[in-house]
Image (cartoon, rainbow, N blue to C red):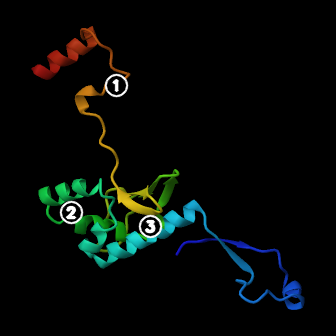
Amino acid sequence: MWMALATTGCSTLDAWINPPAPGANGFVRIENTPESEVRAAFVHVVRVAQDRDVEAFKKLIEPSALPLFEDSEWSHPGHYVAYMAAIAADKPKDYHLDLTPSLAVFRIEPKQRLGDYSKTQTTEVILMREGPQWKIGAPSKPPAEETVESPKVKKGPPTKGQQKKIRQGAS
């Protein structure tokens, strides 16, 4: 498990003269931070993905995100296995983490490797807090294309340059 470690200020001489009390964890104190919690949950996700156990993987998915995964599996059979393979292809420590109190995004960019493995897409795993647990989630759907307006696009009739390009493209 990923845990943040902090050393206590004991020197070897101090430890020899004043040994830790029975039951103490010695010279290393384990800090339970939000980052260590979510990293531990992610390591568990990666281990389940490595086992390619679809039913166990489904138990890690947030209930509201499960229909999206099921729809993907229905339209593209093998989606779960492919997603698990993408997650398991890299070590958990190689993923970049963006963390908020209720959302964690683990992302890894594609790397070129020698051999028969080549990865061309970014792998992204979203974990969402569900009570005390972190579950695999899905991003909210972006707004429909027709409702999104680019701030760079001017409304109104095309300019003379745009009209020329339109005419050239039509011929």
Instruction: Report the Cα–Cα distance between label 2 and label 1.
Output: 32 Å
Q: Nearer the viewer, residue 86 or 141?
A: 141
Which badge, 3 or 2, comes first in the chain's sequence? 3
Give left or right: position of 107 versus 168. right
The amino acid on which the numbered mark 3 sits, given as a three-letter code, is Phe
The residue identified by callout 3 is 42
- Foreground mark, 2 or 1, reads 2
Q: Nearer the viewer, residue 55 or 51?
A: 55
The amino acid on which the numbered mark 2 sits, given as a three-letter code, is His
For label 3, the crowd category at 10 Å Cα-Cα, with few meaning under 14, some 14 to 19 and many 20 or more, is many
- Rendered location of residue 9, percent (x, y): 82, 74
Q: Residue at x 44, y 64 (%)?
A: 133
Q: Is residue 108 visible?
A: no
Instruction: Report the Cα–Cα distance between label 3 and label 2.
Output: 19 Å
The amino acid on which the numbered mark 1 sits, given as a three-letter code, is Ser
Q: Is residue 25 above or below residue 45?
A: below
Q: Nearer the viewer, residue 132 or 60?
A: 132
**Disc 3, SS:** helix
**Disc 2, SS:** helix
Q: Is residue 25 above or below residue 146?
A: below
The residue identified by callout 1 is 150
| Pointer 2 with pointer 1, Cβ within 8 A | no
Instruction: State the mark number for residue 79.
Output: 2
Q: Residue at x 33, y 20 (%)?
A: 153
Please identify the quarter of the rendering in which residue 121 is found. bottom left
Give left or right: position of 164 versus 134. left
| Pointer 3 with pointer 2, Cβ within 8 A | no
